[in-house]
Image (cartoon, rainbow, N blue to C red):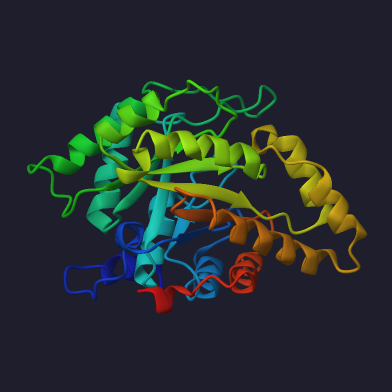
Amino acid sequence: MTLTDAISAYHPGMPEIARYSHALQTKPFSICADLALDRHVGAGELRRQLAVLKPWVDAVGVPDAHDGRLQMSAQAAAVLALAEGIDPVVRLTGRDRNRIALENDLFGLGALGVESVVLTRGEALPPDYRPATRHVFELSGEDLVTTAHQLGEDDSVALGRPFCLGTAATVFAPKADWRPTALAARVDAGVRFIQTQPCFNYRVLKRWMAHLVEARLTWRCAVIVSLVIPHTVEAARQLRGQLPRALMSDRIENRMSAAPDPAAEAVALGAEKLAGLREIPGVSGVALTTPGPVELLARVIETAGVPVAGSRK
């Protein structure tokens, strides 16, 4: 199937797929797993990844070149996912878009049938990134959400359905009097789910979540925690250095190093972390990702004993 065929396949008469928004509303714990996109992943490889993940997830995450590397556009990847019967959760950042570009991209996604979008301000590229690229950063996180919400509610725009909007949040160790005021403002602006950065320190995560529960923010939106699964010892070492906000200790690297089969240990570690997330009050689901093959994510979900997508519908 060509990209043109995939786009043509999505039309009003196409059977309705299970939507991520429905999973957030009706399931005690939802699962989204990221597609692995880079310059080597074309339509054929993407469809293979979708086939691997489809039995295990409620949706697939479509990244937005957060590190500046060449990848298939989010719009193209999303429509291929829809053609395979899987709901995509598309990430869009304000780093590379002004308001006009954001509105046009959102309109295009909506016209193609995409419903779930995570809007973030984005991360600045490192100073040594080449060729040098100018950042935009025109809109704040709240502005991004407000723009998308207003577009989705505008009857004059032929979107077909409102967006299910997500926003990013950073888990940290809050003081006793901290209140999630900024997050509440984004929920007021139209956010329906919050997606955190990867966080390996569950003591900190529990403290942070307790404040969201106390503020009753978890009554108003879903909270999705990101979980990255390193596939090798070297990947664990690199992630610890590259993702300081993930609060990742050297215990994971050491445990994988000591294991006779590091790949199997990666699955066991991921399953333990996933099972632990399900026990934290207020957490509504997980967004899984890995620097390795997506098969690892399917094995983690299976090993953790999370009911598969088909049995949870």
Give 27 or 287, whichever is nearer the viewer: 27
147 above or below 139?
below
Q: Position of residue 2 (x, y in %)?
A: 40, 70
Q: Position of residue 30 (x, y in %)?
A: 44, 61
Give 287 or 38, whichever is nearer the viewer: 287
Q: Residue furthest bottom?
A: 311
35 above or below 100?
below
Q: Position of residue 292 (x, y in %)?
A: 69, 59
289 above or below 200?
below
Q: Which residue lies furthest to the left in this view?
A: 156
Q: In which quarter of the image is the C terminus?
A: bottom left
Residue 112 visible, this orientation: yes
Q: Image quadrant of residue 288?
A: bottom right
Give 117 or 270, whichever is nearer the viewer: 270
Task: Count the labels in the image.
Answer: 0
Residue visible at 55% across and 68% down in the picture:
49
In the image: residue 114, left or right of residue 61: left
Residue visible at 81% across and 45% down in the picture:
237
Q: In which quarter of the image is the N terminus?
A: bottom left
Q: Where is residue 168 in the image (x, y as percent from the top left)?
A: 45, 37
Q: Image quadrant of residue 232?
A: bottom right
Give 192 or 5, whichever is nearer the viewer: 192
Residue visible at 73% across and 66% down in the picture:
268
Q: Image quadrant of residue 100?
A: top left
Residue 98 visible, this orientation: no
In the image: residue 237, left or right of residue 218: right
Residue visible at 67% across and 42% down in the picture:
201
